Image (spheres, rainbow, N blue to C red):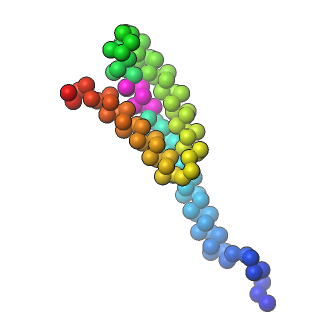
Amino acid sequence: MSKTSAGAQPARGRSAAAWRYRGAVFSRALAALLGGYLLAAAVATACAVHLPSLLGAARSEATVGGAMLAYLVYALAFMAAFACRSAWRAWAWILGAALLLGAGALLPRWL
């Protein structure tokens, strides 16, 4: 009879699964850190560009308000990266929102 039980996996299979799990956690951490930073920067930029025309606020107030909102968005993006079902979905949601807001902030310059 062998030393391993019938239900035990070989050491090689467990190691591959452990590295796959670590890679997924690392990818989520990158999505949270880098993607969250990009999303927060896009939110701050969009607020600084669009709030003066939408609310009639001063540019300085819109910039400070956008920066304060960016801290909240960064924290929410960080939590969302680990709440998603997969790392791919976390990247898609965070970078998709950052790209849309960034394009919206640059739209007045393009037109």
Q: Is residue 10 above or below residue 27?
A: below
Seen at 42% across and 42% down, the residue is 95
Q: Quadrant of the C terminus?
A: top left
Q: Locate residue 66 relative to residue 110 in the image: left or right.
A: right
Percent from the top left, x then y, of residue 102? 35, 33
Seen at 62% across and 69% down, the residue is 15
Residue 44 among those drawn in magenta: yes
Q: Quadrant of the N terminus?
A: bottom right
In this view of the protein, which residue sits in the foreground, 46 or 2? 46
| Residue at the limit of the structure toward the bottom, as seen here | 1
Seen at 62% across and 75% down, the residue is 12
In this view of the protein, which residue sits in the foreground, 94 or 70? 94
Observer able to see residue 93 = yes
Question: The magenta stretch spans which residues?
Answer: 40-46
Percent from the top left, x then y, of residue 68? 49, 21
Q: Is residue 5 above or below residue 65?
A: below
Q: Is residue 87 above or below residue 74?
A: below
| Residue at the limit of the structure toward the left, as seen here | 111
Q: Is residue 70 above or below residue 85?
A: above
Observer able to see residue 30 = no
Percent from the top left, x then y, of residue 54? 36, 15
Seen at 40% across and 41% down, the residue is 96
Residue 2 among those drawn in magenta: no
